[in-house]
Image: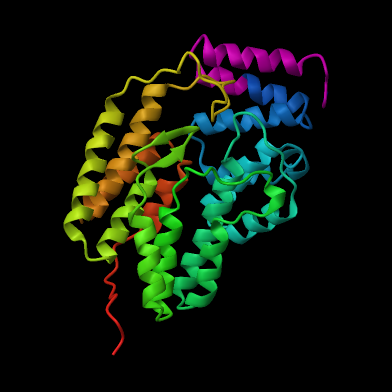
Amino acid sequence: MNDDPGFAPLQRNLGLAYWNQKREPGKARKAYDQALALAPSDARLAYEHDQLCKRLNEAPETRLKALETKLEVVLSRDDFSVEYLSLLNFVGRHEDALALMTARRFHPWEGGEGKVLAQYRIARIALGCELLNRGNAALALEQFDAASKPPWNLGEEFHCLQSKADVNYWRGQASLLLGQVKAAEEAFLGSANETQDFKEMAVTLYSSATCYRGLSLYALKRDDEARQLFAELRQHAEHVRKLSGQIDYFATSLPNMLVFEDDLSRVNQIEGFFLEGLGLAGLGRTREAQLCFSRVLELDPSHLDARQQLRVGPVPAEVDLSPSQ
């Protein structure tokens, strides 16, 4: 019955009804499993099935293993390919992710703005940090420089309002290891002077980039400003967690696929706990920060940034910007 054109759509629609109207996730998963068994080469159906698994908090490693059994189907769609890239980055296979991104021609699609760029940046920065930890600052700096210069085949450029605080912070750290004090100071200043970010098609004053602004302030010995910024980030996080969540009536180009309805209050809880964790980490309250990141992963096991924070975290480093003797 593989690729049966008659029954797969019926099971798919039944799964949507169970999820969106009946609020019965177990039955929704069963219906989608049946639909995919009937039409395993239907790329749209396979993508929706993975998105449902993601909403059901299936482990990213399990999802990745499933996708790699049908890579031809996965790579037939840009949105599905980006989801695959996010899983590669999640498990630390950054070179594999980068190899796919440099070889594939992506095309922009409504609702997917910035998604492939985000995975490109994540992979480059992660590889740079690995090199930095091994003491190879020169190659690390090349990765950080490349992080904000996407190749043409990704199909889009970073938005002019998007923060580069993270890239500049790591460029500063690499420059210090190379003994390039002036370049390091310029990079830290570039990061510290960021005042906003562009996220999910909107300008925001606070985001994960705020953390790197604060770390750059620490690097510049402007500790009071850094602590104030991290305290403000915590206050913002508390506000976000209390939001009920609703879609703007005039919203267009939404960043997430809306085949499956999301609990927007839960989405705000996830974002709030993550930002609070960053604020606490910046204030030196590491244990409390880790609890926040763990809470994020309980709510969303595929949250890449929280996983990365628990794995390594951008711990403020002792840096010296004074001229070498």
Which is more toward the observer, 219 or 259? 219
Residue at 40% across / 29% down in the picture?
Answer: 267
Question: Hey, which quadrant is residue 191 in on the image?
Answer: bottom left
> Is residue 46 on the magenta stretch?
no
Asked whether, in this view, residue 12 is left or right of residue 311, the answer is right
Please state, as top left, top right, bottom left or bottom right, where the C terminus lies in the image.
bottom left
Q: Is residue 187 above or below residue 66?
A: below
What percent of the width, then of the height, locates residue 2?
Answer: 82, 27
Asked whether, in this view, residue 278 is left or right of residue 255, the answer is left
Viewer can see residue 285? no
> Is residue 8 on the magenta stretch?
yes
What percent of the width, then of the height, locates residue 84?
Answer: 63, 44
Stretch in magenta: 2-30
Q: Is residue 303 above or below residue 239?
A: below
Asked whether, in this view, residue 173 is left or right of residue 140, the answer is left
What percent of the width, then of the height, locates residue 237?
Answer: 28, 36
Residue at 27% across / 65% down in the picture?
Answer: 220
Q: How many marks?
A: 0
Residue at 42% across / 49% down in the picture?
Answer: 307
Which is more toward the observer, 1 or 81? 81
What percent of the width, then of the height, locates residue 273?
Answer: 31, 38
Question: Farthest left residue?
Answer: 224
Please state, as top left, top right, bottom left or bottom right, where the N terminus lies in the image.
top right
The chief SS type of the magenta part is helix
Viewer can see residue 253? yes
